[in-house]
Each structure stands twice: as structure tokens, then as C-alpha cells.
Amino acid sequence: MLLSCRWFSIEYWYLDSNQQRIWSFPVSKIVAIVHSGSTNCKKKIHFVLLISRQGKVRLTKWYSPYSQKERTKVIRELSGVILSRGPKLCNFVEWRGYKVVYKRYASLYFCMCIDQDDNELEVLEIIHHYVEILDRYFGSVCELDLIFNFHKAYYILDELLIAGELQESSKKTVARLIAAQDSLVESAKEQASSISNIIAQATK
Amino acid sequence: MKDMIRAIRACKTAAEERAVIRKESAAIRAAINENDQDYRHRNLAKLMFIHMLGYPTHFGQMECLKLIASAGFPEKRIGYLGLMLLLDERQEVLMLVTNSLKQDLNHSNQYIVGLALCALGNICSAEMARDLAPEVERLLQFRDPNIRKKAALCSIRIIKKVPDLAENFINPAAALLKEKHHGVLITGIQLCTDLCKVSPEALEYFRKKCTEGLVRTLKDIINSPYAPEYDIAGITDPFLHIRLLKLLRMLGQGDADASDTMNDVLAQVATKAESNKNAGNAILYECVETIMSIEDNGGLRVLAINILGRFLSNRDNNIRYVALNMLMKAITVDAQAVQRHRATILECVKDSDASIRKRALELVYLLVNESNVKPLTKELIEYLEVSDQEFKGELTAKVCSIVEKFSPEKIWYIDQMLKVLIEAGNFVKDEVWHALIVAISNASDLHGYTVRALYRSFQTSAEQETLVRVAVWCVGEYGDMLVNNVGVLDIEDPTTVTESDAVDVVEIAIQRHALDLTTKAMALIALLKLSSRFPSCSGRIKDIIVQYKGSFVLELQQRSLEFNSIIEKHQNIRSALVERMPVLDEATFSGRRAGSLLTTVSTSSRASHNLPNGVAKPSAAPLVDLLDLSDDAPAPSSSDGNFLHDLLGVDLAPASAQSGTNQASKAGTDVLLDLLSIGSTTPVQSNSSTPDMLSSGLDNQKQIATLDALSSPLPSAPANSSVGASSMMDLLDGFASSPSKREDNGSVHPSIVAFESSNLRVTFNFSKPPGNPQMTLIQATFINLSSDAFTDFVFQAAVPKFLQLHLDPASSNTLPASGNGSVMQSLRVTNSQHGKKSLVMRIRIAYKLNNKDMLEEGQINNFPRDL
């Protein structure tokens, strides 16, 4: 018996060796999360998470593909594990064959997920690097800054990491690039408002 | 925007929050429908926030694309951010953005180019990688360094997605290594490292051309004067250090010359890096790993091990953790040096930090050998008494495995296992105590000793379930030795146990409510055995057994009734019936253990373990029949499956064939085959070649007719054509070209690791049948990486429309632990778009691990391209 499969739609048809037993199930029922299937995605950060002490998510960035369902599951599981750990323990948690490196700054936990054989200490340093840049940008950053300017936090992260790899080791360069882009946005806004002023005046 | 966040934050309950979100989402959807230009970016920002909270936002995906397509920088910036957050590489919508990306990569504004590169690097799919690779390659030479570094990371993503493209990037990547800008240098080094991973030519090229240059760069950076921009804790750019060391590791591995070139500089790093700050330790850690991986240099290795020793005694938990981690790798290089730290490592097993404990335990496990097993086991078992509940399971499993693997003598093994059972009997896995029983039954000189030791421990630790099981079994088998003090060893304290004391043990076991069915069933068997061994207690035992006559659990009820009738009516054969178990064969057991757990149990100690069958189908008519039967004929209840099959198969076959379940029709066929005395014992193959078979319709009809004729004793002969067909297939197996006899002389393709998780690895071997380029034969090999066997292993696969898939049955449905064997399964894939599209497959693997259902899924994209 041959099978047909609607590849990109919601339902998948699976076939086992008895051929007859074909059934479908919605993707949302996926239980386990596996590596994206190819083995060469090694050595990188799989995702970045910022969780508050109450377990609220403040920032998520996924560098390996996870479906929405999986993401929620990951966040729930990890926040359970990490928030329950005591203050003096080490900053690494082994989880589903990966390692999660986390560090607490005030009320926020910064977490990054890496492969088993990656350098945990370096990731800890990357987290600190990110926090310092945030601190410099916002001027002594606090959780509220990140809530109301979450997009800014993302922009900074994008200047620091691409595809889960570090792209810049100089805080100054990151700050300069972000400032340049912010000013581009500002000038575009001014331009827009001056145009609308002109239009407004012209129509008077 | 801020108002919305405030409103959401003001919500006190989840329901309120949902209400606010619903309102906002509705407003945004309305704005989208009206195609509102002005507030588009604000709406998208809101959507991202909503998305972060975990609510559905798929309706906003098209908005991202519109924003990206607009001209201004602010719109594009938010658009790309939304793209990266709301979509991932698996969505089809992503294809629509390829064109905008292409335009932006060629944009005159470098910040827009930067945005496009960032998005591409984070979410590009294989198709996009192929389309946009030339643009990225060109941008590696862009005038602005910030674009070059982004392009380099983008290239990493591209070559990971499409390894074939790697060769185009080798030369530009090598050029990046000469850069002075740290960002470009770091990303360039990363790109080279990843190129080395996907392409052996790249590795060879960099090894020849760049090793010396990299060593020089590393030297410069170590000795560079204070640079405020890159300084972290007194070290100039630790990130660059680490990446250089990583790449050098790739280059040095397996190449003596390259390793030689870098020896000096590694020694310099190892001695110079500051070890009182995290950054310095990160470098040292990376350096140690590099030293361990490159070709042997005795002096450096000593230096590295010493660094790890220093790490291990560090007060910082992080440092100790990485030290343990690294020692695990070092053990293959220099086991002796690691053994020196054994005491410290053992201390770490008792640490308060779960992560450290876990690492340390794994390391200890690797450290154990014949010479140190006794002290190590002693330490671990002592710790077992005080460890946390959640750690006990893991610890118990490891201790058991150590004891089994390295025990120097039987008595020591039994002693240690008893200790474990006393401390953590509830955490001991079934297979472990089964193994213990096998070992006990084989040690004939220790029977008396063991049963007495178990008797004593039962008095103190009756709450440990597995201890109770083993004790009950041994008392049942060797109860006479317990009472008569047979084979007393010098080390034992003398004890006096009366016959009724022995029966007490079993009675306590059977009457504890907390204990489960298996234990109770075992206890009933033990009672039966004791009734013959201790005739004086026979009456009392009968009373206990009779109590279960009305048990709601079928298994117990059945046993109770049968045993009662044995005791009452069949005195003459009772003693023969309950003789001591024959010595269990260790070799068969360990062989079986590697295979299925269930079958092991039901055959090795037929006494108690046929439970799963009985419990699973309490209402099944056959069992009731059997019950009636056994009332007048004292057959042991746990007749094995064949007996039941033989007895009932004949009546059962037609009925179940009609019910149409797969299993039953198979059974029916088997019976048919038996009747026809064809003698083929192989189970019916899957009907993968049924179509071919059916095509010869006339033949088929005739066969069925003969079948009918031959099976005349069966009133309702299998009119069910599927049964006929499949049995016929068996009949004709010799003539039909069966799939397994295919000749593999097609073109050769490299095998791939199709899927790998922490538990399981799947490799695919490919072959092509001659004359049919569209078809690919895949031999899948499954290897179990976990420490426990898998049962009920089922592999399923799905393919897109342009492919057709056939699966043959797997070689087995159980998978032995830790890679001690594999399951094979062949697949046949027909690619209707051969040459245009490559294979892709989604797989789903279900199995039982420790009786827990597991399900793993994955997508295989790394098929060789020309299949």
C-alpha cells in the first residue's frame, strides 16, 4: 500500500512496516523534541531565553528550529528547573542531552542552550558581555527597561549573535552600530513628521 | 504599544490577560484587514510581544513581509525583527521573502544590508541558502568590516544547510583570517572551523596554508598590550583566544606536523592565562581540550592534567563542573592520571549540586576497574544511604551496573546487591533483580547463605519492594535451607528460623497492601512450594492461599484456585510439581536480557512472570476457558503462550480472522500453515509484494481453492482474502523474487547518520537497483545509545508527495542497550522527481524504555543529493 503525504499541511501521514496501519496525527501533538535532524548543527547556541524570577518570559531567541508548541514546552520545563536551583550552585544544567548555561542578574535569569561538548565558561562570558552592553545602552538596565523596550534588547542581541554564533567581541562597536541605526530611525521619523507638517500646512 | 504592555502587566489573573490579548489581537487583525499603513510597524511590535507571551500570532506573518518590502529603514528594521521572531525556517511563507532579501543584500545602505544578513543568518532554509549564496559570498569582501563579519556568520549557516556549497567559501574564508578587525577575525575563524567540519578538502587546505598564520595571531593576541576595547578581566579578547584554540584543535587533530607547530603557543597559553577569573578559566579550559585532542605531546598533556587537577580543587562550582567534564575526555588519553584524582571525584558525587553530582557519578563509572571496584562500591553504597531521593534512582542504576560488571566473586556480588536492595530496593530495575536471581540460582554453594541473609534483611527493610521479591523467591525455593541451616559459612552469625517463621515472611509479603501484583503472585508460588517443603505448615498455607480465591485480580484468583486444588486433591504429584527450579542458564539469560525484557522473564522463571498477558486481557474468553480446564487438570497456570495457542488456536482462528485485526489474521495464517504442515515457522511477512502477487489472479484463486480444500476440518475456512494472500505469499516465497534477495550492485552512496538523539542513532545505507534510477534502497540501522534496552520498537516514516515509500518489517522489535546490537529495517523510496529534488523524510520512532512510552521524531534533510 502506498502512501501519500501532505508535506506542508498540518497533518502528516505515517507509515509503519505493516503498511496497513497508516494513520495521521496533527503536528501539535508532537511529544518529543529532537535535534533538527541533521547532525552537523554542532557547536552553537541553540536558543537564548530571558526569564524573570516569577517565570515570565522576557526575551526568546531561537537559533534552531522549534515549533511554537515545542517552544512553550521548553520554556516551561527550563524555567521549572532553573528557577528552583539554589544560589550557590553551578551555572550549568544538563537538559535533554544539551546544556543550559544560565546566570542570574537581579530579577532576571539569562539562559543559553548549548551542545554537550561546548565551552560553558565561554557562554557564561557571552551572557555577561550581553548584559554589559544592555547596561551601557539603557544606563544601568533593569527588568522594566527590557519589558518596555524589548525590541531594543532584540536589536542588541542581533548585533551580538547571528545564527547562534558570536559576531562581535567589542562592546563599543556594538554600541556604535546600534546608535547609528537608532539615529537612522529618528531621522526617518523627523522627516516623516516634517512632511506631514508640510502637507498639513499646505492643506490649511 | 506601551499602553498595551501596561495593560497586560496590570492583569492579575491569566483569564484577564487572555481577555486583553484577545482584544488586542482582534484590533490588530482588523487593522491588517484594512491594510493600515501608518500603524503597521506598531502593530507588529505588539504582535511580537504577544508572541513572546506564547499566544498565536500567525496572522501577522504577512505583515512582516510587507514591512520588509517597504522602502524605509525603520519599517525594514521592525519587519526583519518580526520575521525572525514569528517565523522559522520550516514555514513556506519564508520563500516569499527571498526576493526582498536579495534586493536588500544589494542595497546601498549598509545597515539595511546588515539587517538582511542578520535575518538570513538566523532563519534561512536550504532553498534560500542556495539562492542567496552568491550574494553572501560577495559581501565577504564588502568594504565595511561590520558587513564582512555578518556575511561570515551567514556563510556558516549556508554551508550547514547546503554542505555542497562549502568549496566556494574556502578562499574568501582564508582571506578573513588575515584581518585585523576582531569581529571579522572571530567570525572568519568560526567560518573556517565550520568549513573544516563539513569539508575534508577545506580542512586540508587550512591545515597547509593557515596553521602558521593562526599560531602567529594567537601569539600576538597573548602578548598584546592592554587594549581597553577588548579587555575582559585583564585578558585581551578571550573570545578570540577561544575561537583560535578551537580552530587549531580542528587542524591539529590527526596531523602530527600541524600539532607540532602549535605546541609552543599552547604551552604559552596554558602557563600565561590568569586562572582567578572566569574569562581566564574559559581560555584554560579550551586550551586543555585542544591539548587533549591534538597529536601526542607528553609534556603538554602533563601540563593539561595538572590544570584540571587545579580546577577540581577550585572552590567555584562552575570550575569544578567543567573539570569533571574534561576529565571524562581525558580518561581515554591518560587513565592513570585521572585515577590519581579519584578521591576528589568521589567527593563530588556527594556534592549538593545536582549537575556536579551527575557529572561526577558518570566519571566514577568510567574510573571503575577490577582493582578499585571494592572500595569504590563501598563508598557509593554508603552514600546511597544518605543521598537525596531524586538522585537515588540514577545512583542505584550505576552501582548495580558497576557491581554486575566488575564483581570479582559471586559472594561479593550477592552481598553488594543485597545492600543496594536494602537501601534503595524501590529504585532497582526489573532486569537487575532478575539477573540477581539467576546469579543466586547458579551459585549452589551460596543458596543457604543467601536465603538467610535475605531473611535477615527482610526483617529490617520490608518496605523495599524488590528486596521483598527476591526474598520471597529465595524463601520459596530454598526455604528448607533456611530452616535447616544448610551450608553455613564462617562469616555468618548463627540463626534459628522455624518453618512457620519462613512462612511468616511470605505471608507478610502477600498481605502488604502497598506491594504490587507481581510480588503477590510470586508470594503465592512461594507458598505453594513451601507447602510441600514444610508439610507441618501445609494447613496454614492453604488458609492463606484460599483467601485469594475471591480476589478481583484475575491472576491472583486463578493462582489461588489452582494451587488450592493442587494442595487438596493432588497430594501425590505435589512434591514433583513444586520441585526446586532447575538452575537458570546464565548465558541464555544474559543473551536474552540484551534482547527483550519481557521474554526473558517469562521463560527464565516461568513461575510468576506471565502476568502481563493475564492482566492485560482479563476479559478474554480463552483465559476463562483455561480456568475451567485447569480445575480438573492441575496444569500449572502459567502455561506458556504456545500451549494456549495450540489449545485455542484452532477455534480462535476463524473468529479472529473475521475481526480483521492484523495480529489475529497473522495468527490465523500461522495456524493454517501448521495445519497444512508447511513447516514454515517464520512469521508472515508484510505484504509489501502483495500487488505483484495479486496480479497473477488466476493462480491466486487456485491457491485459495487448494487452501480451502486442505483446511476442510475448519468449518469457516478463511474466506478473508488478505489471509489467503499473505499465507500464499509465504507459500510462494521461494519462487517470488523476495525483496531481501535483491542484489546491491547499483551506484555507491555514502551512508549517513540520519538521526541522532541522546537515546538513539539511526544510520542509513543506500544502494540503487540497476536500471531504475528513481528507486533507492535504504538499509536503516538503529542503535540504542542508552543504557537500557528498548522494547516495542516501531519505526515509521513519512515522505512528501513526490516520493513513494515502502517499508519492510524490522529485524526485531527490541533493541539491546548501549549499542550492543542493532535493528535493521529496509526501506524503498521511489523519487518521481529524480535529479530535480533530493530525498527528504520525516521519521517517527516509538519504543518503550523501562516500560515508559517514548516517541522521537525528526526530519532528515541530509540525504546525498543525487538520490
Image (cartoon, coloured by chain):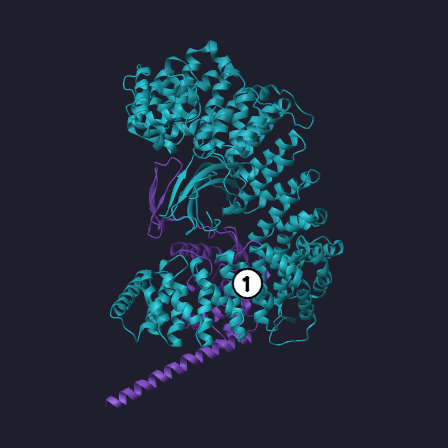
Chain colours: A purple, B cyan
Q: Is the residue marked by circle 1 packed among few (<14), some (14-19), or many (20+) residues within 10 Å?
A: many
Question: Where B351 sits versus B847, above or below?
Answer: below
Task: Check the image and name the residue furthest to the top.
Answer: B572
Q: Quadrant of residue B590?
A: top right
Instruction: Specify the amino acid type for callout 1.
Output: Phe
Taking B426 as reference, is B676 above or below it? above
Which residue reaches farthest front? B771
Residue drawn at point x = 57 percent, y = 43 percent: B395
Q: Is residue B126 left or right of residue B820?
A: left
Report the front residue among B253 and A125: B253
In terms of image quadrants, where is residue B250? bottom right
Position of B302 compared to B811: left or right?
right
B394 or B544: nearer the viewer:
B394
- The location of residue A43, given as percent across then percent down, is 55, 57
Whether residue B490 is visible, yes or no, is yes
Q: Quadrant of the N terminus of chain B?
A: bottom left
**Relative to the observer, which residue lies in front, B434 or B298?**
B298
Q: Chain of mark 1?
A: B
Q: Is residue B247 above or below residue B810?
A: below
Tell me if I can see residue A160 in this picture. no
Q: Nearer the viewer, residue B52 or B239?
A: B239
Q: Secondary structure at mark 1?
A: helix
Q: Residue at x 50, y 76 (%)?
A: A177
List the residue tagged with mark 1. B169
> Residue B393 appears at what percent x and percent y?
53, 43
Residue B648 position within the rendered picture, expressed as x and y whole percent measured from the top left:
35, 19
Q: Quadrant of residue B244?
A: bottom right
